[in-house]
Amino acid sequence: AQTVTQSQPEMSVQEAETVTLSCTYDTSESDYYLFWYKQPPSRQMILVIRQEAYKQQNATENRFSVNFQKAAKSFSLKISDSQLGDAAMYFCAYRSVHSGAGSYQLTFGKGTKLSVIP
Amino acid sequence: DAGVTQSPTHLIKTRGQQVTLRCSPKSGHDTVSWYQQALGQGPQFIFQYYEEEERQRGNFPDRFSGHQFPNYSSELNVNALLLGDSALYLCASSLRSQGLYEQYFGPGTRLTVT
């Protein structure tokens, strides 16, 4: 079974600065998807960015980028030019590519609470 | 374009009772997944429905059951409620023909069991 670990329960960043959230995972599969989701106090989970394991290039979405280290099974999220609206819980998630038992479900880490200081 | 909707927003039940939560998927989506998110934890996969059948199930007891209707909406039923069932229940929808590539989440139903 796959596991996802987020070792930073809480992080804080000054507005306009850069912050990196860590995520490691354990899997025996060679192909999979990784995601970062944001959950603001309103509770609705929003997809921030995704990475396909077969792609060596790190995904980027505007101010959000990832550092995907497949051999190290590490998938960190970098938020540049942090804004007050970035304050939320951030969850790292894993999803298998292959069909069969356990596929298609998302396996989440416990989350990192990000605070943005004005 | 309506996103994923869930009802009710909040619910308070007593131990031993039964509860039904509802989810309407994003327009055009045909697959619904349910997750349980305990306080301070990440969501845990309960099960997934496609073509009105349960396709996958996480590590949850049979007290948790579901249904999917022809219009793709879904219900989550929990019988014999326990205090430990108190959580935020999230519904996520996706399109199977796209490999369930992206799951869109609803705002959740907060269930409190007393």
Image (cartoon, coloured by chain):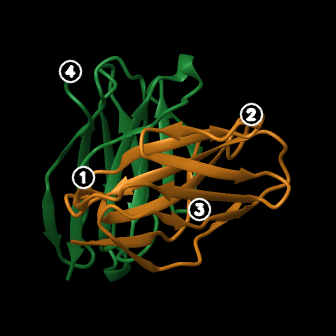
Chain colours: A orange, B green
Labels 2 and 3 share a subunit:
no
Mark 3 element type: loop
Q: Is residue B91 shown left or right of residue B53? A: left
Crowding around mark 3 (Cα neighbors within 10 Å: few <14, some 14 to 19, many 20+) is few
Labels 4 and 2 share a subunit:
no
Of residues A47 and A29, the one nearer the viewer is: A47
Do callouts 4 and 2 mark residues in contact (Cβ within 8 Å)? no
Chain ID for label 1? B
Mark 4 element type: loop
Name the mark nearer the viewer: 4 or 2: 2
Chain ID for label 4? B
Q: CA distance from mark 2 to mark 3?
A: 31 Å
Disc number for residue B20: 1
- The residue located at (24%, 31%) in the rendering is B3
Q: CA distance from mark 4 to mark 2?
A: 31 Å
Name the mark nearer the viewer: 1 or 3: 3
Chain ID for label 3? B
Q: CA distance from mark 3 to mark 4?
A: 33 Å
Disc number for residue A55: 2
Q: CA distance from mark 1 to mark 3?
A: 19 Å
Do callouts 3 and 4 mark residues in contact (Cβ within 8 Å)? no
Q: In the rendered structure, which disc, 1 or 3, sits on the residue that comes first in sequence?
A: 1
To which residue does mark 3 refer?
Answer: B59
Crowding around mark 4 (Cα neighbors within 10 Å: few <14, some 14 to 19, many 20+) is few
Please name the amino acid that badge 4 sits on. Answer: Asp
User: Residue B59 at x, y = what percent?
Assistant: 59, 62
- The residue located at (56%, 54%) in the rendering is A93
